[in-house]
Image (cartoon, rainbow, N blue to C red):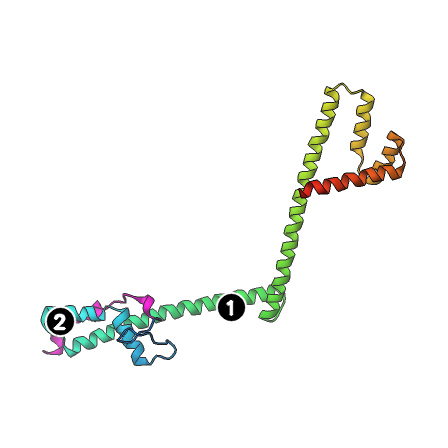
Amino acid sequence: MNKSQDPDIKRFIKLTDPEKIYDIQDEDGQSISYEQASGRQLFNHYRHRTTNYDQVLDQTRRQQGYVSGYQQKQATTGAAEQILEQYRDEHVKVIRDAQLKGSILRTLMNKVGVGTAQALVNALDGISEGIKDVARLENSQRSLQAWNDTYRVQRELVKKVLKEEGVPAEAIAKVNKVYSTRSTHKAVELATDLFDLEKSEILKLIKSAVKYQKIDEKE
């Protein structure tokens, strides 16, 4: 049959199993190291296991009773083109990813003011620790804010209870003075005036209260 009479079957060749491109096997199904496989082994694997090369030739053989040399060559060319296009697409993606990562790396190095990747890693480690410190500080601030809010509510409730229980106004005034203190030193001075106690006794009372509070928080 004349070459011009052979149908062009190259257009029917498709890449059907691209995930097998790096899982190289010989004709017996034995695995071959990708790094050590020969060019012939690679192409035979690609042609027979990643494209529909064999299926197209089998279908052609069933339809016309044979496969011409030209048709087989066309099928082989079609398989090679499909595989090369897949490699091209993968390489373009790898190159673009590398360029993007390189650009990001250079930008980070410029912003941090370092000249090597290792220096950038060290700087980022320091920044990471700083971020952790900030997070711990924010947690402490939130805890302090919650405690302060609770304290204010308790203070107002105590005042409300005193009024409801008919506590004399003089006693309520003393309670308000206690709540108005803003330091341990002022609290000691106020306590000595209110209760006629020695400073040492007041300090002992404050220390016991603080100790009790810490134990209570742990529980």
190 above or below 131?
above
Per the image, the residue denoted by label 1 is: 102
Residue 107 drawn at (x, y percent): 56, 65
Which image quarter holds the N terminus? bottom left
For residue 72, side relative to residue 153 (left or right): left
> Residue, x 81% and y 35% (percent of image)?
181
Label 1 SS: helix
Q: Residue furthest top?
A: 166
Is 156 in front, or is 89? 156
Q: Nearer the viewer, mark 2 or mark 1?
A: 2
Label 2 SS: helix
Which residues make up the magenta segment?
Answer: 1-22
> Residue, x 21% and y 73% (percent of image)?
75
Question: Given the image, on which type of amino acid does mark 1 rest?
Answer: Gly
134 above or below 106?
above
Query: Magenta includes 150?
Result: no
Is 194 in front, or is 146? 194
Q: In which quarter of the image is residue 74?
A: bottom left
Sequence order check, earlier mark of 2 and 1:
2
Q: Can residue 144 be seen in this view?
A: no
Per the image, the residue denoted by label 2 is: 61
Question: Given the image, on which type of amino acid does mark 2 rest?
Answer: Arg
Q: Residues within 10 Å of mark 1 (few under 14, many from 20)?
A: few
Residue 63 drawn at (x, y percent): 11, 68
Q: How crowded is mark 2: few (under 14 residues within 10 Å), some or many (20 or more)?
A: few
For residue 81, side relative to residue 9 (left or right): right
